Amino acid sequence: MKPSLNIVPFVSVDNMMRLVLQIGPEQVMRDIAGYIEADFRRWENFDKTPRVASHSEVGVIELMPTSDGEMYGFKYVNGHPSNTKAGLQTVTAFGLLAEVETGYPVLLTEMTILTALRTAAMSALAAKHLAPKGAKTMAMIGNGAQSEFQALAFKAICGITHVRLYDIDPEATAKCARNLAGSGLTLTSCTSSEQAMEGAEIVTTCTADKQYATILTDNMVGSGIHINAVGGDCPGKTELHRDILLRSQIFVEYPPQTRIEGEIQQLAPDHPVTEFWQVITGQVPGRTDARQITLFDSVGFAIEDFSALRYVHDQLKAHPYSEPLDMIADPDDPRDLYGMLLRAKAKG
């Protein structure tokens, strides 16, 4: 059946910021985490495929599609670490949500800000199930565009009260501390990764360089810690020494994608990992021992973006921060598309 409305709501960057500020960033991330958890509970209903990636020497451009049979969603996203030298974002994104029954889109939105929110929400959701109980201190290594979102998500969802900041660029750390002032978090700016790790029960690594890097060495990681590895998200880009992986219980989103893009690209293709959705559904346990090292090898997966798109679509019912976008041709006779063109010409 043809929808009665052919105008698609478009959420611009400005309107996304209005929406997030109206609801509150921490509440938005709590909400998105709830949507992700609900969708992970019905994981088997979704189409799943590793993202379609086009790699170059300077970065990657990707499409991330999925469908639950009723709605279809995709995200376009890039990753270009050297963009910062030109004053550009390293990651930009937009996304679309559509009805499967008609193929008609029902939402087009920016997803640069939304991806930062959903990435942080996913990180904190994983930590809620995997981190040591009662954890209060997190090391945040890499203080770029994602860092504040991560810190606030862990505060809102996991109850973190203290964040220890480190970046190889002191200006990035100063920026992060400045932005988080007044957030209620206790902040410590550190001069090395080792210093940032002191007393931390959770460590988030979130660096941008596309290279095999060693942000954490094996001797830096003691028993009982939870590692939220965010930065390694494409082939040839990692953050953790391989020996850390061999000591950890590893949790992933979608193994066929993570084995290509995540920290586990350093391991044998058959190295055992646990799919996080199975923890959500109770099929397998999360953390089982206080001394266990748990690792969430986060690369981002299309179902998480689908959840975020669903969330924004639902919020527009109460918070109409969108613009009508005329992007669907609507001829009087659906077989007469050219006739619509001629009538437009006649109108001048």
Image (cartoon, grey):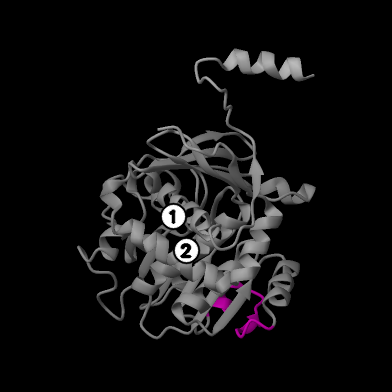
Binning the other alpha carbons within 10 Å of mark 2 as few (below 14), some (14 to 19) or many (20 upward) gives many
Magenta range is 182-197
Given the image, on which type of amino acid does mark 2 rest? Ile
> In the structure shown, which secondary structural element does the residue marked by tag 2 occupy?
helix
| Depth check, front residue: 164 or 314 | 314
Q: Is residue 47 magenta?
A: no
Looking at the image, which residue is at 37% across and 39% down? 49
The quadrant of the rendering that contains the C terminus is: top right
The reply to whether residue 228 is in sight is no
Q: Nearer the viewer, residue 136 or 339?
A: 339
- The image shows residue 170 at horizontal and vertical percentages of 73, 70
Please state which of residues 178 and 203 is positioned toward the viewer in this rendering.
178
Q: Which of the 4 image quarters holds residue 100?
A: top left
Please determine whether, in this image, residue 316 is positioned above or below residue 140.
above
The three-letter amino acid code for the residue at tag 1 is: Ser
Q: How far apart are marks 2 and 1 (CA)?
A: 7 Å
Q: For the point 51% across and 67% down, which residue is it?
A: 29
Marks 2/1 in contact by CB < 8 Å: the verdict is yes
Q: What secondary structure is marked by label 1?
A: helix
Q: Which residue is drawn at 55% across and 73% down?
A: 26
Label ID, residue 32: 2
Please name the residue that numbered disc 1 is placed on.
Answer: 307
* Residue 187 magenta-highlighted: yes
Query: In x, y percent, where is residue 94?
Result: 59, 45
343 to 140, vertically: above or below = above
